[in-house]
Image (cartoon, rainbow, N blue to C red):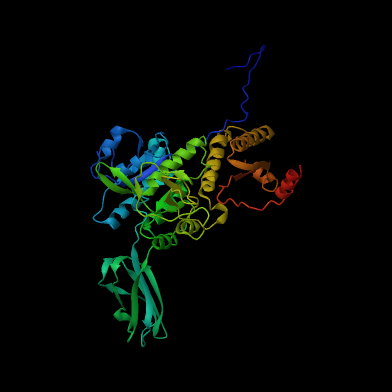
Amino acid sequence: MTEPTFGITLTPVDNETRTPSAADMSIVGIIGTAADADAGTFPVNTPVLMTSDDAGMLADLGAAGELKNAIAELDANTGGRAAKIVVVRVTAGANTAATMVNIIGDASTKTGLHAFKEAAQVLGVTPRLILVPNFTGVVQKGVSLAITTPGNSGANGTFNFVFSGGAGTGAAGTFTVTGGSIASLAVTNPGIYTAAPTAAVTASAGLTGAAVAVTLVDLANSVCVALGPVLDDLKAVAFVSGPDSTSTAAKAWRALLTHQRLMPVDNGLKVQVGESLVTIDPASAFNGLQVLCDAEAGGVPSKVIANRPVQGSVGLTRAIRFSLTDGSVDGQDLLAHQIGITVRGSTADGAIADSGFVAVVLDNAGEDELWRQYHQVRMRDYIDLLLVRTTRSYIGRFGLKVQTIQAVLNTMNTILRDLQVGGHVLGGKVDYDAAGNTPEALRAGKFTVNFRAEPVPTLRNLAINTYRYSAALDDLLTQIAA
């Protein structure tokens, strides 16, 4: 349009504060087998979007495998809300280990867990609560090596062991000969075994009298290990269920996990399916409860599912003794090891409820105590995504000038204000980073702002001091005298 010689020119100015744009943190991603599923509706290794109450798609999943029952238990705990679910179906292997390999998948071909990373492009949504029913608690064993006799007369160098026998496959390792004897061992692949193989030194080493003991040790669950990097990519978290056998086994399983996006839980649920009682992974119910908690907070992931009733279950696979006032009981010990549980209500002193079944999940499996409470990790993700989604419209469209920076700061302050008003953060601050902004950085189009916010911690221990009150005796005397 040519500007008029004599008239008025209108120039739209678009540097106002942006309305906060939040990501949906409550979309569940579920992966598992469903041998009877309609392949047209649920292709293998392909993310498919559905809602938890979609009867047609649930029918297309079929009754076999883990998916249908897990979704039903999830749906029972959402408080009547339909959850958005991204389903990834994998084929069942010849055994549990083979199925776990299919669940883990491959990053280069986007199969298994990695298919969730395609959901944003294929479906326009990103799952941020990941559920892997029935496979995160499988405890596998691999080889461990120890020198029993170092031997002598060997050639110096590093050589491969030859493994044979046992029940399993995959073991590989090396031994280093120094001064004619075995000086060190290394397991390069523990394999997966149910009975230990034997390890023989190679003939090329020339050792005489050398012997190595092979034992089996518990391995970290391979699905949980593979989940970590996928969760990082998605900015997601996952309730992962343990072996559900004993508390000792649960703690041993938990001790091999280290990731702040994993929330370990144990003891399964008994659910009525038709005329049968079946065991359901508790993570299915916990994902439903988390969807409910997020909805109650207006979509903000600022709540944990501790002290929430579990619906749809008729019993527990393992009773865990619990008391709110006795820290020595089994349930409190599991919580101290960052293992969430489901406990039964009763009329006993210290019970968490009078009846029913109640979830208590607080922590993740990370090592950083600052981010131990899992909802605070989710809140950090929520705030990061909120900032990106809300401020991205400024990038490239505006010059780096005072008006633009003020608009960005105003937008970020609006985000902080809304989080404080909603009770999702205790407080915070948005300020200009004087040290991080140099003339050279500004010339390159770079500007740094600090955004600080403190997520609200969960009330997890209420200390109540009880005293005698002697002043009441003085009051009594006054009343008698009157």
The residue under the point 38% across, 77% down is 146
Q: Position of residue 330 (x, y in %)?
A: 45, 59
Instruction: Examine the rendered structure and indicate whether residue 224 appears above or below residue 183.
Output: above
Viewer-proximal residue, 336 or 162? 336
Q: Quadrant of residue 216?
A: bottom left
Across and down, in percent, residue 221 comes to 38, 58
Quarter of the C terminus within the rendering: top right
- Is 42 placed left or right of 303 in the picture? left
Is residue 471 visible from the viewing direction of this image?
yes
Residue 475 position in % (x across, y down): 73, 46
Image check: 362 left or right of 226? right
Q: Quadrant of residue 275?
A: top left
Q: Is residue 264 above or below residue 286?
A: below
- Taking depth in this image into account, of 181 and 139 the one nearest to the observer is 139
**Image quadrant where one finds the N terminus:** top right
**Quick one: which residue is furthest to the bottom in this view?**
153
Residue 444 seen:
no
Check the image and report above or below for 39 versus 335: above
Residue 213 lies, in percent from the top left, at: 34, 77
Exactly how many numbered labels are in the figure? 0
Instruction: Report the residue that reaches farthest toward the front.
Output: 481
**Residue sitting at 30 percent across and 35 percent down?**
57
* Residue at the top extreme, as displayed: 6
